[in-house]
Image: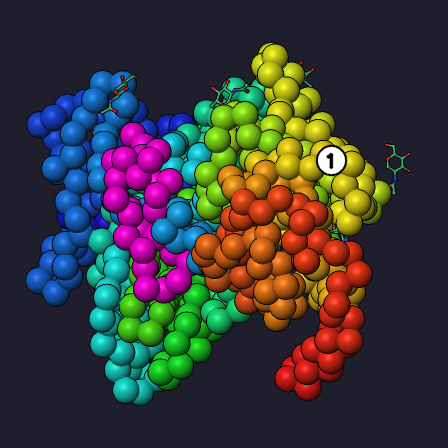
Amino acid sequence: MISLSFLLFVDDMAPQASGLSPPVTFIALTPCLDRSRPQTLLRMSSQAEEAAEQTSNTVEAPTSSSSTETDPTNGTIITVTVGATVPTGFEHTAAEEVKEKIGVDARVSKDRGRIYFPITTDKLFQVHLLRSVDNLFVVVAEYDHYQFKESKEETLNELQELASKLPWTSALEVWRLNRTLKKKKGHRKAGNATRAKSNAEPSEVPAAAAAAETEQQELPQVMSPDDDDAKAEVTPDSETRQQDLEDTAPEVKLIKFRVTCNRAGDKHSFSSNEAARDFGGAVQEFFQWKADMTKFDIEVLLNIHNDEVVIGIALTEESLHRRNISHFGPTTLRSTLCYGMLRLCKPQESDIILDPMCGTGAIPLEGAIEFNESFYIAGDNNDMAVNRTVNNICHIQKRRADKGSPCGLPIDTVQWDLSNLPIRTSSVDIIITDMPFGKRMGSRKKNWDLYPSCLREMARVCRPGSGKAVLLTQDKKCFAKAISRMGGLWRKLHTVWVNVGGLHAGVYLLKRTGSVFGQTPEDVHESRGRGDAQKDERDDKELC
Ligand SMILES: C[S@@+](CC[C@H](N)C(=O)[O-])C[C@H]1O[C@@H](n2cnc3c(N)ncnc32)[C@H](O)[C@@H]1O
Ligand SMILES: *[C@@H]1O[C@H](CO)[C@@H](O)[C@H](O)[C@H]1NC(C)=O
Ligand SMILES: *[C@@H]1O[C@H](CO)[C@@H](O)[C@H](O)[C@H]1NC(C)=O
Ligand SMILES: *[C@@H]1O[C@H](CO)[C@@H](O)[C@H](O)[C@H]1NC(C)=O
Ligand SMILES: *[C@@H]1O[C@H](CO)[C@@H](O)[C@H](O)[C@H]1NC(C)=O
Ligand SMILES: *[C@@H]1O[C@H](CO)[C@@H](O)[C@H](O)[C@H]1NC(C)=O
Ligand SMILES: *[C@@H]1O[C@H](CO)[C@@H](O)[C@H](O)[C@H]1NC(C)=O
């Protein structure tokens, strides 16, 4: 079955004559219980059906939803592939979480920073609760080895033709289902106060968190002749008008969309800009949707990595890594990356976990939420950082209290200097921190003093024999030097290479050796290396 042109009712409302042409199709929003009828939620208009017949020999039929099951309470259940962007380097960690929480095997894409896994639509809500995923999308189609044509023109033409050949139906159903999930949630939580707002869908442009090696662009679409109408709809005035109408009359809303193209690879004859523009134009023509870069209902994703092409529909409006942080600082770490670091050291019941340079507290906060059988101590020497951490914790505590939850988060905040922690020797199980890179925070020069004193003090408070540390830094050279001088106290087990805001960084998993602190040459504060350090710093400059 092919849906050629349709218009979606985004609200649970009856159709209304709108004078729009071509004739439109609507989504049956009540779960379809009649097993004798095709279980599809996207019905075609007669005109679309005619068109479908005309082209049926050239157009590949989309995945049929006839194999779906129905359930009186859960509606139609279909199986789709969900794609997720995850912090690069932590793909396998994310796959592990998916296995644990959704019970399915995820495929790690060769396009680093992505995983794919199958879900039945009844699991859709759980997918949004995963802690290691940044953005989610439902896959429309994927090509492992797409044969791009030689010339730019041919390639772009083919992309345009693709738009009308893709099996959109299931993915669009999932998008619609997600929309109803979201609405239900909004209603319950916020009563009537945010209803108008949530209907207006203020989809802000996602914060650019593009991996450095990826060319990422969000571009304006080719504008249709009735572009003016589209613009009028997004002005504050008409928005207010829309909201007023919503309270009084059912309203037909034309779907607004945009195409976002992520392209990586150097063998393409076209830019992501051109691909998004031409593919977007064809999508617009095919569905009769309106292109709108900022206030869109649907975000179509065109991901191109060398010869791998994946077309998807976004299921997140904002990266999930921001969801539990309210007070951001200059170097706030993505909570999804924090989650990956936490998983690396496997927190156990009653573990004492320290983040001695907590900044906004993203790491211990994620720990306190997700691995809540351990206890976290978050500290920083900067009072603004400490304030932010306190505010972030309070914000969540307050929301929990409002919901009637009696449990506080297992976390405390302290202001301290890392080189002199008010913590007893050998009392901490895990240290997990994000060290100043010396770029956005601190300086490379300072790191040559900070890193050794940091590793020394951490070795003091950490339990010999069983203690662990997970440390993130971009200053790999300085870190390597510092750790090599601490060989008696720390042993490097594993390194995960990650991408932090475009910077290549390492997450080092260290194990505290059995050596008692204060008895190895490394503990001596006046370390032998002053002269060395200066020399290394010179080397560093020469190399960079
Ligand atoms: C890269 S930031 C940590 C960011 C944090 N992970 C977040 O998500 O906000 C490094 C932090 O180390 C802190 N810091 C630097 N030197 C310190 C020291 N000697 N003692 C304690 N904290 C220190 C800085 O104030 C900064 O907040
Ligand atoms: C449908 O929902 C019910 C509860 O509403 C649940 O017990 C059941 O497992 C769901 N069915 C499927 C297939 O998920
Ligand atoms: C999908 O549902 C989730 C969870 O209810 C919601 O947060 C998200 O904004 C929805 N996505 C879209 C694209 O509407
Ligand atoms: C709806 O909003 C009005 C005005 O903001 C408020 O007075 C009323 O209590 C709200 N009703 C509910 C059910 O939340
Ligand atoms: C984190 O944020 C999500 C989405 O806003 C919310 O549902 C969840 O309750 C939050 N977690 C905590 C521990 O507050
Ligand atoms: C820890 O988290 C689990 C799962 O989210 C929750 O059921 C439990 O009540 C939490 N425990 C505490 C002490 O908050
Ligand atoms: C931190 O918060 C305290 C009280 O909330 C305030 O007195 C202090 O000035 C704040 N410090 C900074 C640097 O914002």
Coordinates of residue 432 in the picture (x, y in percent): 59, 45
Coordinates of residue 253 in the picture (x, y in percent): 45, 41
Q: Secondary structure at mark 1?
A: loop
Q: Which residue is found at the position 23% from the left and 30% from the top?
A: 76
Q: Which residue is found at the position 43% from the left and 65% from the top?
A: 261
Q: Which residue is mark 1?
A: 423
Coordinates of residue 451 in the picture (x, y in percent): 70, 59
326 or 354: nearer the eye? 354
Residue 497 visible in rendering = yes
Provide the residue span drawn in magenta: 95-123
Q: Amino acid at mark 1?
A: Ile
Coordinates of residue 247 in the picture (x, y in percent): 56, 25
429 or 155: nearer the eye? 429
Tell me: residue 192, above or below residue 315: above
Numbered marks: total: 1
| Left or right placement of residue 470 versus residue 389 in this view | left
Q: Which residue is found at the position 33% from the left and 74% from the top?
A: 306
- Few, some or many residues within 10 Å of mark 1 (<14, 14–19, 20+): few
Tell me: residue 435, above or below residue 352: below
| Left or right placement of residue 508 versus residue 355 in this view | left
Q: Let me know if residue 98 is in the magenta part.
A: yes
Q: Which residue is found at the position 40% from the left and 81% from the top?
A: 266
Q: Does any atom of ligand 1 lie closer than 8 Å to the CB of label 1?
A: no
